[in-house]
Image (tube, rainbow, N blue to C red):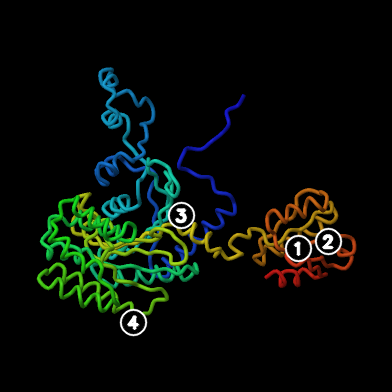
Amino acid sequence: MAQKPNIPKGTRDFSPIEMAKRNYIFNTIKEVYALYGFQQIETPAMETLHTLMGKYGEEGDKLLFKVLNSGDCLSKVSDKELMERNSLHLAALMCEKGLRYDLTVPFARYVVMHRDELQLPFKRYQIQPVWRADRPQKGRYREFYQCDADVVGSDSLLNEVELMQIVDTVFSKFGIRVQIKINNRKILTGMAEVIGAADKIVDITVAIDKLDKIGLENVNVELRENGISEDAIEKLQPIITMSGTNDEKLATISKVLGQSETGLKGVEETTFILNTLKRVGLKNEIQFDLTLARGLNYYTGAIFEVKALDTPMGSITGGGRYDNLTGIFGMPGLSGVGISFGADRIYDVLNALDLYPQETVTATQVLFINFGENESDYCLPIVAQCRAAGLRTEIYPDKAKMKKQMNYANAKQIPFVVLAGENEISAGKVTLKNMTTGEQSLVSPEELIQAVQ
């Protein structure tokens, strides 16, 4: 008996309707990226392990999918090494390649390899799948898409402004109301300095980043567990619970960080970004949030995060400024700033709010019913006319019972059906049926095209 087919855990099949929805997301993001002068690149699904290893920390290295060398992958392995069963050592001998873990490290490798061809600043976007050997669970997959955009080779804060405009434009096109949160790594560094815990910045920011999820009391518990003094925790309270408008919070934090040169630089950068965005105007709210602390080992300046307002969901977009993207490959000093849209989470939000335009999930617009050879011969030139006019058109391939053909149209949610029998053929027309209203009308091919359009 044949084994029942399946797919690896943490991967998914996508139906035609699901793919139509996903393509709507990808195409919308691509169109907006292009509006702002970003150009698309692609990198291979596989990178050398030399490129990937050591870039994501010890835990990240464990989550890399490694690819066995082609041919006799055991040829370099001795019996003794096999018997030792050291999986990391064996993988180093048997694997030279791995599936990409994210799009950032491959992008850094791309910039270094192609630096002589690139016009700086280089504005790139990339929409491709990535793979992580993580434990699959709800909302976490082993294969998923990232939609990244980065500007490298420019220190200008206008890049941050443009990226926020891109975020605003994309979610306005989707019809999703969002809140854009902004902070700055330099401000967080300054906070740690003024409370006397500069060496604990990572512990502090990891804890306060959870404020929305676990509450102030539990944040303070975590700070204590990480060795932050009671005096430092007490000084931190009015900072992380600060309220008011963006301008009020910036004015207050500016006074608090008065003795921190780094912190004041972060306030200056954030003020410029927010004031410039006021002038260009955003449709969605942007909020200065002192508890936002994304990936502090990576980001060095402005940091962003986006949350949907009308449905519970984690971050659906994030990003920030980094100062040394290519340093891992021996090309230091190249600053950049980027964002990444979470396509899978955006998909879930659009589903939850039922915001997909009907035309994005409707594949075929018109189905011609097949009554037989003479009728299909009459219809085929009209089918060609419809397609030339840009209408997505099918003719049912077989002479089948009318009920079967209508069921086909209903199952595929085709909004219009065309019928042509003896009467229509003699009149040089067709009958157009609206499958939503049930209304039928006798029309010429030109009138058919006009009605559907």
> Could you say which is closer to the camera, residue 449 or residue 160?
160
Image side of residue 281 versus residue 24, left or right: left
Residue bearing mark 3: 344
Q: In this rendered view, identify the residue nearer to me: 453 or 6.
A: 6
Q: Are marks 2 and 4 in contact (CB under 8 Å)?
A: no
Q: Secondary structure at mark 1?
A: helix
Q: Which mark is residue 420?
A: 2
Q: Is residue 266 above or below residue 293?
A: below
The amino acid type of the residue labelled 4 equals Arg
Choose the circle earlier in sequence order: 4 or 1.
4
| Amino acid type, residue under disc 1 in the picture | Ile
| Distance from Cα at disc 4 to Cα at disc 1 | 53 Å
Q: How far is mark 3 from mark 2, CA to CA?
A: 43 Å
Spatial CA span between label 3 and label 1: 40 Å
Image height of 158 relative to 206, above or below = below
The amino acid sitting under disc 2 is Ala
Residue at x 64%, y 65% (from the top left corner): 390
